[in-house]
Amino acid sequence: MKNKYTYVWVSLVVLVFGILFIPKIVNRLKSGTVTENDRMNVKDNSGDLAFVMLNGKKRRVPSFEFINQDSLVISNKDYEGKVFVAEFFFTSCPSICPIMSKNLVEIQNEFSESDNFGIASFSITPQYDTPRVLKEYAERYGVTDLDWHLMTGDQTQIYDLANSGFNIFAAEMPDAPGGFEHSGLFALIDKNGFIRSRVDEFGNPIVYYRGSISEKAGVNEEGEKQQITVLKEDIKKLLEE
């Protein structure tokens, strides 16, 4: 009889735990305190932007030097003193790149009056994306900012810049749409070359901004500000620093 009562009490404890704590765990999973991808969900945040850290040090964009759509040599020095957004893309991408480019054009137009803002687009198919191809792509999408450089060059250097320099995934994958896989993320860099981001509601830097989602300004069904709206707000903060 004693074992029977013990079994009943254990069952009640398990039931109460499930009722009280399982929903909270699920909510944390969705809100982003556990998963890296969902941690990019952000709420309203008017505070200072965080520095992205690596091994206890502020993460700075490494040196680079490539050729842009006008066949000009462009390096990280051309972005010194400017706030800029960086992305990795390719002109023949059949999936997310057109959305990313349209979002960046929207951002370009938002900051068209600023001399201290730029965009850096690195092609992950440089063997195909020649300056001429990049120029045609820029004209097709409405790239007008003189500080928006679409760059091509040595593929090994570009992939190293993506995967090690920015920690934004890019790789050649035959089974992926267009034969290449990349994350579709935007990085935000301040005037001193440091990668910056706002933090989520738990105080963790979101690190990157989703550039591959077609969205309108406002709030989605989960009450989260859309990523391009968030990015615009954070660019303004850095321009004012």
Image (tube, helix red, strand yellow):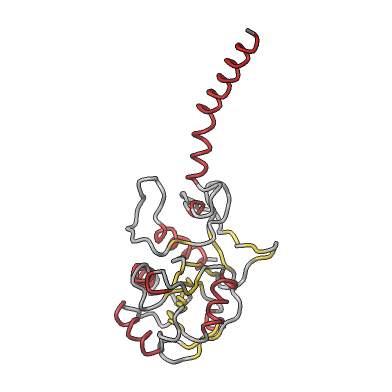
Residue sitting nearer the eye, 153 or 147: 153
What percent of the width, then of the height, locates residue 43? 46, 49
Q: Is residue 23 above or below residue 129?
A: above
What percent of the width, then of the height, locates residue 145? 39, 79
Residue furthest to the right: 56
| Residue at the image point whose x is 40% and y is 85% from the top | 128
Residue sitting nearer the eye, 84 or 184: 184
Residue furthest to the bottom: 71
Q: Is residue 133 above or below residue 98?
A: below
Count of marks overlaid on the render: 0
Q: Quadrant of the C terminus?
A: bottom right
Q: Is residue 64 above or below residue 217?
A: below
Q: Is residue 208 visible?
A: yes
Q: Is residue 103 visible?
A: no
Q: Is residue 141 above or below residue 10?
A: below
What percent of the width, then of the height, locates residue 32? 51, 48
Residue furthest to the top: 1
What percent of the width, then of the height, locates residue 65? 55, 86
Horizontal side, residue 203 vs residue 135: left or right = right
| Residue at the image point whose x is 56% and y is 27% from the top | 17
Q: Quadrant of the N terminus?
A: top right
